[in-house]
Image: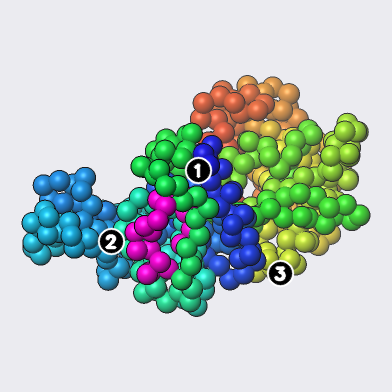
Amino acid sequence: MIYADRADAGRRLAHELRDLRDQDVVVLGLPRGGVPVAAEVASALHAPLDIEVVRKLGAPAQPEVALGAIAEDSGARVLNERLLRATGTGEEELASVEAAERTELARRARAYRGGRPPLSVAGRTVVIVDDGIATGATARAACRSARQRHAERIVLAVPVAPGGDDGGVRADADAFVCPERPADFMAVGQFYRDFRPTTDDEVVACLRRGNSREVTVPAGRVRLGGELTVPADAVGMVVFAHGSGSSRHSPRNRFVADALNGAGLGTLLFDLLTDEEGADRANVFDIGLLAGRLADATAWLTAAPEGPGASLPVGWFGASTGAAAALWAAAEPGSPVAAVVSRGGRPDLAGERLADVTAPTLLIIGGNDPQAIELNHSARRSLGPAEHELSVVPGATHLFEEPGALSQVAELARDWFLRHLAPAGR
């Protein structure tokens, strides 16, 4: 089997692991290439995602020769005794190599997690994922690290490995899952059409979205597709209300959601309308209907056993007509929302309800979007006594397509939500 890329390999590997879905599982990806694979596995299993940083121990005079590998825990080490003898590497030389690699290992762990401590694996099933196995040294080191952290069961899962010899991985894992064991194995990249190196930024992005799961949101008589992401250290939740016939797959909203996840804010992106409803353009501008769906989604989120419950404050992020829906719903007596952000929105469509909005509201518009500027300034004058601000992104048009414009939107939204959902600050 040839995989299209690491994401494709992850989806196929997840199918082999489907019996673990919704169990007490933690998925650990091996940076860098194993993390995109692990992200797909974690999403399919509805499991949290973290990393297990491992480093190869290269021979002093031949760093490309792997003498073994180490993982984050000091005792998690695998050595190739045959190569140690063949290269004449003594204990002092090996200790020097290991010390340097442990320094780099610690640096990468901090950079990837952003200073967050590793997820606890004690008493849980741990699925360790890489994009493939060549020698097995790094995979074995990762398994030993999880064992030292008191994992109850360790499953090593990779898309491809050499046929026959398993590199000794079965000695360190309770189960080994590998759908492809070709006899003609020469290198992991041989079994991928796209095997470009994974970057540090891609690892961080995967971790930010690593706790994402597809969900079904009940709203009255309909069921709406959604994607729920709850970082391990979440300080608040933000529900997105898209507009103008868009969906939970909106690339602009997903860009902002990624930035919020990185700041410790959970997100729920969901479809405000079913496919059939979306075909009727009138529904896109039925602000009352959209506001009701937003309120229903929020009620489900705070009550759902798999969600954060009532323990975390909730904000709403609206775009275009979705912004009007957010403000419409925020005007309802007893509204649960703690803060609202509008991106290029149509707050004017909330009409007289603006005067009843009590949640702190941030209106974000582009400096080259004259219609939105006029409508948002007018809407701001109609807002109630609660705190509200209007921020203009210089040079941006309605869709914030200019270089850096959407990043400014994400930063403004992030700071607003952190300010009002996590007053203690981060």
Tell me if label 1 and label 3 are in contact, CB under 8 Å. Answer: no
User: Does the magenta run of residues contain 167?
Assistant: yes
Q: Which mark is residue 6?
A: 1
Label drawn at residue 70: 2
Q: CA distance from mark 1 to mark 2?
A: 24 Å
Which secondary structure type mostly characterizes the magenta part of the structure?
A: loop
Residue under label 3, please give it: 305
Q: Is residue 155 visible?
A: yes
Mark toward the start of the polypeptide (1 vs 2):
1
In magenta, the rendered stretch is 156-173
The residue that appears at 40% across and 51% down in the rendered structure is 162
Quick one: label 1, few (<14), some, or many (20+) residues within 10 Å?
many
Is 334 left, or right, of 220 in this rendering? left
Q: Is residue 388 above or below residue 122?
A: above
Name the residue type under label 1: Arg
The secondary element bearing badge 3 is classed as loop
Q: How many marks?
A: 3
- Which of the two discs, 3 and 2, sits closer to the camera? 2
Residue visible at 59% across and 57% down in the picture: 16
Between 201 and 14, the residue placed more toward the observer is: 14
Instruction: Please provide percent x and percent y for residue 420.
Output: 60, 56
Amino acid type, callout 2: Ile
Circle nearer the viewer, 1 or 3:
1
| Residue 230 on the magenta segment | no
